[in-house]
Image: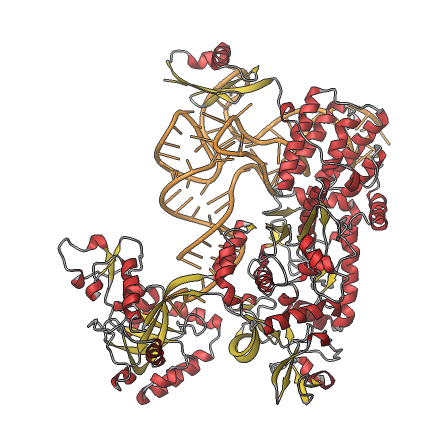
Amino acid sequence: MYDPTATETRWQAYWDEQGTNEPDLDGAERPFFNLMMYPYPSAEGLHVGNLYAFTGADIYGRFRRLNGDDVFEPIGYDAFGIHSENHALRVDIHPTELIPSNIANFERMLRRAGLMYDWKHTVDTTDPDYYRWTQWIFLQLYKAGLAVKKEAPVNWCPSCQTVLANEQVIAGLCERCDSVVEQRNLSQWFFRITRYAERLLENLEWIDWSQTTRTAQQNWIGRSEGARLWFPLDSVAAAGAAGDSAGASGGTTGTSGKADHAAVRDKAIEVFTTRPDTVFGATYMVLAPEHPLVDVVTSADQREAVEEYRRATAAVDLVERRKTEEKGKTGTFTGGHAINPATSERVPIWIADYVLMDYGTGAIMAVPAHDERDFEFAEMFDLPIPPVVAPATSVPDGADPSDVALSLDGGAYVEHTEDEILINSDRFSGMPADEGGRAIVEWLGEAGLAEPHVDYRLRDWCISRQRYWGPPIPIIYCDACGVVPVPEEDLPVLLPYVEDFRPDASGIAPLARAEEFYRVACPECGAQARRETDVSDTFLDSGWYFLRYPSVGFDDRPFDAGRTARWLPVDMYIGGEEHAVLHLLYSRFLTMVLHELGYVEFEEPYRRFRKHGLLIKEGAKISKSRGNVILPDEYIARYGADVFRTYLMFLGPFQVGGDFRDVGIAGPERFLKRTWDSVMAAIDSGRDGLVDPDVERALHATIKTVTEDLESLDYNTAVAALMDYLNTVRADGRVPSIDEVRPMVIMLAPFAPHMAEELWERSGGEPSLFDTAAWPDFDESKLHTDEVEIPVQINGKLRATIRVARGASQDTVQALALEQENVQRHLEGSELRKVIHIPDRMLNLVVR
RNA sequence: GCCGGGGUGGCGGAACCGGUAUACGCAUCGGACUUAAAAUCCGAGGCCCUUAGGGCAUCUGGGUUCGAAUCCCAGCCCCGGCACCA
């Protein structure tokens, strides 16, 4: 009788004592860094979703190990951050107490789950030996000019009482607490990730990642190709400073220097557009209500209306805005005008909240004929809607495309394919739209009023948090010296114990209440100075943790050069898709920066990334509010880790996810029990050798399937193949031989490592199986029998199956097929017109 | 709205490059063992027609093909991401 708990505890102790799971970090010849996303240690304990992900990653690591790689599989804890702090607030226990006990609990559960972790190299982001280097990274970015403090409209969560990165705002709501996020103007630290937008995007072309994850990042970075255009302000133009010399008269001199350009642009409204070809149709402009030029362009008689509109929209949060979207557009005329540089016409300047301050330039040229939003706005406020782009086919032969009408009954005409041409666009009329757009930009560019430009949706990464539970940002403010970085030798800036760490609505961090913390002498002049009291974002902690793992233990450097060269970049990273645009983007960015600064040799941190699917329970999402939370502890206590692991991997395709049902566990449970019984019976029988050709063939086929499936993470079908093989060797009460089952034990080891170890040892193997066993090979020539069964179809319908020798000729197959009674019946009275024969696969007789 | 992924028995899910649809497992039913039950073992099963056999089945409707779950077109539904992004 197999006792999972006793056996599993025994092998876990063995692995620990022997250091089975600790590769030689300095000498490994075939290093393989197998990474999984470290968890944040919640008080609820290890979630089954975590374990699902870890088990899938662990199986891959064990598979590589059995194939001869030196696998390094570490784990750690993302223990700083809002998620941990919020939890501490909820249960009213100080995080300095709560977090260590949570971590201890996690470690106990992870050990019990049989994961191949190197427990000597764990990471805890709250450990000063770790966050000192998080602060160090901040300083490197600061020195490189990539960490900057700026006043900016930021997302403010009134419930978490902190700012959030754009990535943490989901549909206008806080990703943690679902509160409506407000916009506030605050001075914050930003990392200039936008400078790397293009490279982050380009590298997506070649890194080996799950396709969906790549696509999500592409969308998030959101590249738009187009142009910047400058619309001179009318009042300025009237004053004669810039003039309308660039106008449709085309009389530009082309000799204006850069300085002239700057002067012209200084008195203009800058817009970004992806459709410079439509500039002749720009009949008005719109500024975001908070645009700085609003005050400049607003006329005296419109000032009151403008102020009121600004007040009204400022009070409206993002969710409200979405509702007004359904009601239609709103806006107010400023009374000001600008000059359309293409037509030289005066166009009115409006403000409206459908233009967002934080995208592009916060201002647009409105082309109502060719933009749905502008169209809606123009109809509402009765602005002209002249079409300037039309399908080539709509222009009659011989007609002058400078004077073509296009019906816009159905709304804006937004098509932009190679079949569109420009109309009503002066000398550009008749040109294909794309080409025309480029020509227009070039023409206006001569006067400094246009230039090609690529814009990104990606924003700079705001890393300041007005919270307590994080690494203090290592900056000191001195009245005399200004912003002074903490000298590297003074790191870490320790997070002090603060009894009342509650955040408040002031926008000032809890550390600002700890005078003994923030009062500090300026490192440069020694005068009384003040520390930064914000802490950094959790995603900065997790942005580099994988770099630390191999170098855990070095306290004088963040990552050792030799270790890093040997183990990085990460060979395989398996994790959840929910981090496609957060952690995975930030860690790529930080790696790129560290590469550029000469600290690491690679620019992309992960060679391969695979996303895993989501686990649901009986058709419903797993959540505390639904009360359907699965506690791995209970299941492992009841069935053992091996059964639980195997079940998790069997319930659906790992990369897709699956449905957890208690009753389903019975399958893998019985499977492992039978495996145990059969292998023990084989050992008792003392039989060896591979004498049964059917079993031998099944064995080779199974090795092939399981090997391929593990490589591609198709764990569910790998388990199915092992089940199938077991059914074969023990069919009709048969007792298998040792040689029939030993390869099976090895292939089972990634799923059920404890039982595999036990069976390996009992069948004469030297422990640990993971050190002494080699992944079995298969022989292609032994995959097939000499005879094959092939279907005989008539007009594509199955009418018989026949057995023929492998490789039999069409004549042989056809002759045999025609002998079949059922085939003859169906052929009776009809004429054979065609025969399709695929050797060893099928025969199709086509009749009339 | 845009971008991705998906829809196969009672259920979870298989199916290489278009070639015997429903592997493997769960639940169910029948049998063996047992005083009985559990456990275990053996067996059955897509649906419909009385059987040999036949008809119909992979979201719906068309198409390509000797042959379609697989390829193409149109539509419906579900899931995930982005979203007044100029």
Q: Position of residue A141 (x, y in %)?
A: 60, 70
Residue that appears at 31% across and 89% down: A301
Residue that appears at 64% across and 53% down: A570
Image quadrant of residue A431?
A: bottom left
Q: Position of residue B83 (x, y in %)?
A: 45, 65
Location of the C terminus of chain A by quadrant is: top left
Q: Nearer the viewer, residue A61 or A837?
A: A61
Identify the image's colour scheme: rainbow, by chain, secondary structure or one colour: secondary structure
Q: Position of residue A466 (x, y in %)?
A: 63, 77
Residue that appears at 58% across and 55% down: A577
Q: Position of residue A32 (x, y in %)?
A: 68, 48
Above or below residue A186? Residue B58 is above
The residue lying furthest to the left in this view is A398
Image quadrant of residue A3?
A: top right
Above or below residue A478? Residue A395 is above
Q: Is residue A345 left or right of residue A834?
A: left
Q: Is residue A700 left or right of residue A309?
A: right
Above or below residue A224? Residue A825 is above
Q: Nearer the viewer, residue A3 or A405?
A: A405
Image quadrant of residue A533?
A: bottom right
Location of the N terminus of chain A by quadrant is: top right
Q: Is residue A332 visible?
A: no
